[in-house]
Image (cartoon, helix red, strand yellow):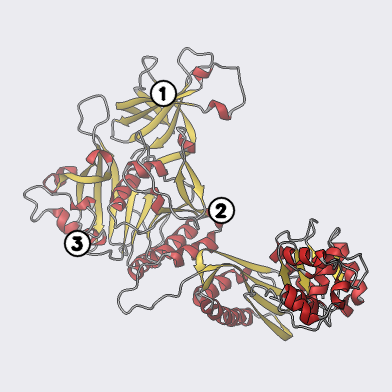
Amino acid sequence: MAEGLKPGSFGVPDDLSALALWCQQYSPLTALNPPDGVTIDITGCAHLFGGEAGLIVHLLRRLPGARLAVAGTAAAAWGLARYGAPGNEDILPLPLAALQLSERVITRLRRVGVRRIGELRRLPRAELTAGYGPEPVLQLARALGQAPEVLAFVSAPPEWREAEHYAEPVFATAQLQAALARLTAKLCPQLGDAQIGATALAARFYRIDGQRPEILLGFAAPCRDAFQITKLLIEKLAQIDPGFGIEAITLEAITTEPMAPVQRSIGAPAAAYEKPINTLLNRLGQSRLWRVAAQESHIPEYAFRRMPVALPPVPWGRPRAPRPVRLLPQPDAITAIAPVPDDPPVMFFWHGRAHKIIRATGPERIAREWWRHKQDNSRPETEKIRVYYAVEDSEGARFWLFRAGVQAGEAPARWYLHGFFG
Amino acid sequence: MFSPSPLAAPLPASAAEHPLRQALGVLRQALGVDSPLRGTMHECRAPEGTAAHIAFVIALLAGLAEGIPILWASKTASAYPPGLAWLGLDPGRCLFALAADDAECLGTLEVALRGGMAGVAECGALPRLAARRLALAAKTGGSTGFLLRHAPVFTALDSTAFATRWMITPARSPASTSTLGAHRLRAELLYAKGGRTGVFLYEMSEVNHGTAPAALTLVGGGAEAGQLRRTG
């Protein structure tokens, strides 16, 4: 057994259970010793690292500052790692605390002059049990390998991975498509048995020249529908260049989420929209499919923000003032004729056409968010206000116009078209 | 029960044989007035430089049953979410997709319709094959789709695959004041599968001070259809 105390080093998982999993590179059997230790059963594994000494060196190089000890039993290793000198495998000179005895028993034994494990070992066992309970004898027997120890070894989380290897490299698209269909058909029932669904999938193609192109799928909602996954994988297969041939293909669910089993109903199936959303997400990608959430800002461009499709929708309230159904990505400069400084224009020209304005509602003044900008003293802050008007032209078309600046300001007022109401 | 549909608004008294009933029979069914969603596709056109068709479609979609997600696919991100909210369509229900070209835009809409979502796509050209595919997808998925285009009344590639085809143009509001009155839209039904064409004048009116979706109320058409009818 090897026992290690939790190190504070970087590059190594900090969480104890993650550390125990990390230690599985030395042996498949590792156990947690909360709060700060990990036990590794190195039986039959040490020679892979050049014996016990080599293994200690290997571990110390990766976990600088960790306290390590190797012993025949887990209990002895526990004590040696905490109380022993490095390289020492004899537990007899260690203090009683190295046996994981309770504080009360240690105090009482110390009162009769028993301070070390060696001294405890010389005492007759029957009397020791009668006087101090079963604990000291049992712990001593465990440390000496005379009583069985129970260790709760951690098991690694299962890997949702399926692989196919080929004796002869494959090139043909049809072969690759069939392989992806087979892998998906193997993986999806496993996910179903575990009641989980994949939210990210990777299909990796191991080429004989060492290259490893891959197809990544992402899902907005967990998915284990073999048909849909196969279809999406085959759609993206065109990106994969088989080169001189592919000798292995793996399909792995990288991230998974719980997904309850679905009861097949006899009647009309309940509406489920994950399927089209997942398909679109993989066709267009995260950046080209989004939901929107309202954002607290008076600036029309910042009144909403995009959010990933996987997040649940956020309900909206009604805006405080009318908002157009279409907003131009950039306000379009127009020439407008406005009679009085603060009146809506009577006419404007856009794209070479004159629009005579019959009716208008406004003004709605929107000041810029000065706290977001660098200080700029070229113009007073009062000139950095947009004055919006909703106007209707002689044909009934409704526009959203704004004037930037004031009529008699340092910079002349400019008019822009920003949106359409209809 | 069903949420109030914009087209469930009361018609004029002499409406027993009102052309709207005939012409919009398909659309009324599609929008779930007395039946659940039926799979139909509709095309709405508008002249260049207006967005009347977007406002029209938002008012129709706002009456759709709750809970059905709506996909907006376009080549530029153009539908303005606060504008949807102003007309009573919750933007939280909407998914927005940015397509690289017309083909991808139509393909995106097709996937959504086939999966049962409602969908709106803005595109330039609409080939006949694409129109057939979209109509079939809407039928398969039992969903409602709208296609928005800036196009003239007649094009060389007009298809009869969709349930209805509209030309939506802005109309002057009736207000005599200098401020904006009720928002009016002139909707010319260019084609309706199994229905008569006609010209209708709708008014978008606020319901319950804006707490309910904007209602499309019919204020003209039928008898006036002859006068309103586009000539040439």
Reply above or below: B43 against A170.
above
* Mark number, residue B34: 3
Between A20 and B101, the residue placed more toward the observer is: A20
Residue A213: quarter of image: bottom right
Residue B196, numbered label: none
N-terminal of the two: label 2 or label 1?
A: 2
Position of residue A47 in the picture relative to residue A231 (left or right) = right
Quadrant of the frame with the C terminus of chain A: top left
Instruction: Say which element carries label 1.
Output: strand
Q: Residue A365 at x, y = what percent?
A: 41, 24
Question: In this rendering, would A44 be left or right of A235?
Answer: right
Q: Secondary structure at mark 2?
A: helix
Q: Which-is-in-front pick, marks 1 and 3? A: 3
- Chain letter behind tag 1: A
Picture coordinates of residue A345, whole percent (x, y) = 36, 22
Which is closer to the viewer, label 2 or label 1?
Answer: 2
Kindly identify the amino acid type of the residue bearing the numbered disc 2: Ser
Identity of the residue furthest to the bottom in this view:
A167
Q: Amino acid at mark 3?
A: Asp
Which residue shows up at 20% across the image and 30% down it? Answer: B175
Residue A287 circle label: 2
Amino acid tagged 1: Ala
Task: Look at the image and tell me in which quarter the N terminus of chain A lies.
Answer: bottom right
Residue sitting nearer the eye, B55 or A94 = A94
Q: Is residue A416 above or below residue B14?
A: above
Asked which quadrant contains residue B88, the reply is top left
For disc 1, the marked residue is A336
Quick check: do tags 2 and 3 share a chain?
A: no
Mark 1 and mark 3: Cα distance apart in space? 49 Å
Label 2 and label 1 in one chain: yes
- The number of callouts visible is 3
